[in-house]
Image (tube, rainbow, N blue to C red):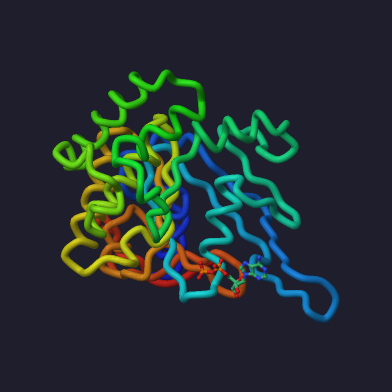
Amino acid sequence: MNDGKAATMLTDAQEGRTSGRTSGRVVLEARGLRKVYGSGSAQLTILADVNLQLAEGEMVAIVAPSGAGKSTLLHLLAALDTPTSGTVYFDAKPIDGRADAALAEFRNRAVGFVWQRHHLLPDFTAAENVALPLLLRGTPLSQALETARGWLKEVGLAERAGNRAGELSGGEQQRAAIARALVTGPAVLLADEPTGDLDEQNAVAVFELIERLHRTHRLTSLIATHNAALAGRCDRVVGLEQGVLKLRSVGLTKGGTALAGEKS
Ligand code: ADP
């Protein structure tokens, strides 16, 4: 492949055109994101200049070593943390500078977040855990529980809705955490090593569940993972190197386009 063609393909992949399933409308965007911890000589630049566009319907993987800043980036995109500089846009509107209530609304409705550790409340039932985001936004208890049970059915846990979260297996807990992330009907799913704590068989099953929900609920998804095989199933893969996002060489993308290198 000549360099010009490779560059065009890289640009296409970066803009999310490989899958052919995206509308091209940018749902979530990071522009010039910088995150610095500490001050003076103890200053640590985790993200130097991150630019990323997630087009509607895209499923994108971030693959980078531990400590590279994946969680930091996902937290900034979910408005769980604020950048030192730079801006996150949701539907072309900046999410910084919003009033607290609008930020809470963004976190609760626009973005669903899945952590590596499920963070379920062990003494509450699976249904109560999944219902929590709905209760936070004022949905009556019976309605919230009914919606939560519907989601538990969708993630294959219909029979476990009444079990305490602490009684579920690791794979089941992560399924419940995914249901909790999506119960409010967000446009974007952000997942931070969602299969990192699971054995290979459960990791594949949970990833396949995310793929199915991504498709059926027309989500836009960004998934941090160490698992190159799972990452390779996404529409595109980006890496984080020295605080900057890079398109990763992963052989074949989902659309079958060969990627020939890296481009920041
Ligand atoms: P990853 O998710 O890729 O493993 P993280 O985003 O969790 O990486 O962390 C990136 C770096 O930022 C690590 O070196 C971590 O120690 C550091 N870090 C994370 N949070 C803080 C914090 N609140 N204060 C100082 N350093 C932090």
| Left or right relative to 30: residue 12 | left
Whether residue 158 is situated above or below residue 256 in the rendered picture: above
Give coordinates of residue 34: x percent, y percent: 70, 60
Classify residue 199 by image quadrant: bottom left
| Left or right relative to 188: residue 235 | left
Q: In which quarter of the image is the C terminus?
A: bottom right
The residue lying furthest to the right in this view is: 40
Tally the numbered discs: 0
- The answer to whether residue 14 of the structure is visible from this angle is yes
Whether residue 147 is situated above or below residue 251 in the rendered picture: above
Q: Which residue is drawn at 51% across and 34% down?
A: 108
Classify residue 197 by image quadrant: bottom left
| Left or right relative to 179: residue 50 | right
- The answer to whether residue 255 of the structure is visible from this angle is no
Q: Nearer the viewer, residue 112 or 136?
A: 136
Give coordinates of residue 180: x percent, y percent: 37, 40
Q: Residue at x 37, y 40 (%)?
A: 129
Q: Residue at x 57, y 58 (%)?
A: 73
Quadrant of the picture in which ligand 1 is shown: bottom right
Q: Residue at x 27, y 33 (%)?
A: 151
Q: Nearer the viewer, residue 225 or 55?
A: 225
Q: Which of 119 and 218 is in front in this view?
A: 119
| Left or right relative to 1: residue 100 | right
Q: Nearer the viewer, residue 81 or 240?
A: 81
Q: In which quarter of the image is the N terminus?
A: bottom left
Give coordinates of residue 28: x percent, y percent: 53, 41
The residue lying furthest to the bottom in this view is: 41
Give coordinates of residue 184: x percent, y percent: 41, 30
